[in-house]
Image (cartoon, rainbow, N blue to C red):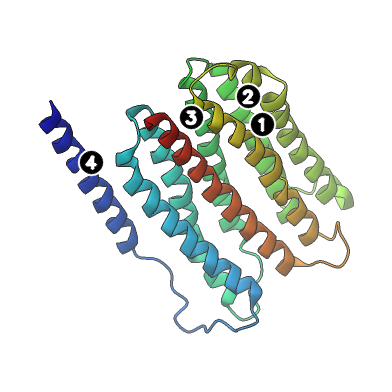
Amino acid sequence: MELKQRIDKRKTAIFGGSMALALIALPSVTAETQILAENDWVGISFWIATAMMLASTVFFLVERQNVPDKWKTSMTVAALVTGVAWYHYTYMREVAVMDGGGSPLVYRYIDWLITVPLQVVEFYLIMAAIGAATFAMFRNLMGASIVMLVAGFFGESGAWDVFGDMSTEIWWVIGMAGWGYILYALWQGDVKEASASGSDGVQFAFTSMRWIVTVGWAIYPLGYMMGNDMISGFDVDDMNIIYNIADLVNKTAFGMMVWYAATMDAE
């Protein structure tokens, strides 16, 4: 039995390492003709985010072998979140360092429309670990996250200015309503009630998840306001830096929370 466990662990290690190397070897966009200026803080923030997302993805894939079986899917989801973000950042950073480059809005929202639902899947997996997950819980959280993202895109892109001059502000309010529902579910609603039991790792994961969604996600509406003239004295460059910081904090911290919770249960 011990020999079989060693063989399985070695196979898992080889698989995780192979996946990490394959990810690094994937073709990505490179701004070959662009040189990053020493004072280009927007470009610097994009490059830091790109490197950190890749490093986090490799770490989660390799560490997946060292966590209990019930956490392996969660580690895979964490790697997918940062891996998808890394892939999109390889394109977004090129836009950032181009002369006259603006905000890579479409790339950003494509990324968020994939990674935020993946984080909702992670919420479901954490609840499933204590046998408290329900389809209604998953459906409501997923629906609220989609409302939040779609409203944000309409408000920032002007793709659907049905509210006239007030479209930016009204879409912002609609997006905040979606986020508000998620906060209510985590702090007062059915998700909170369902989390009353579970191992130390699950309890830690749930508590950390609540704070990431509450504090970490609060950075995004701040960036929205900065880049859309809702706060004076800021512009699109400030918005890009804030969004990059938010992605780093939320996606990387989210995965690290899953990993640490898994190590708690392994002890």
Give the mark nearer the N terminus: 2 vs 3.
Answer: 2
Q: Residue furthest front?
A: 267
Give the mark nearer the N terminus: 3 vs 1.
Answer: 1
Q: CA distance from mark 2 to mark 3?
A: 25 Å
Query: Foreground residue, 147 or 256?
Result: 256
Q: Is residue 180 left or right of residue 93?
A: right
Which amino acid, by three-letter code, is at mark 3?
Answer: Gly
Which SS class for mark 3? helix
Q: Residues within 10 Å of mark 1 (few under 14, many from 20)?
A: some
**Quarter holding residue 192:** top right
Which amino acid, by three-letter code, is at mark 1?
Answer: Ala
Q: What residue is disc 4 on?
A: 12
Residue contact between numbered discs 4 and 2, judged by CB atoms under 8 Å: no
Q: CA distance from mark 1 to mark 4?
A: 36 Å
Q: What residue is disc 1 on?
A: 144
Q: What residue is disc 2 on?
A: 140
Which SS class for mark 4? helix
Q: CA distance from mark 4 to mark 2?
A: 35 Å
Quarter that holds the N terminus: top left
Q: What residue is disc 3 on?
A: 201
Total numbered circles:
4
Q: CA distance from mark 1 to mark 2?
A: 6 Å
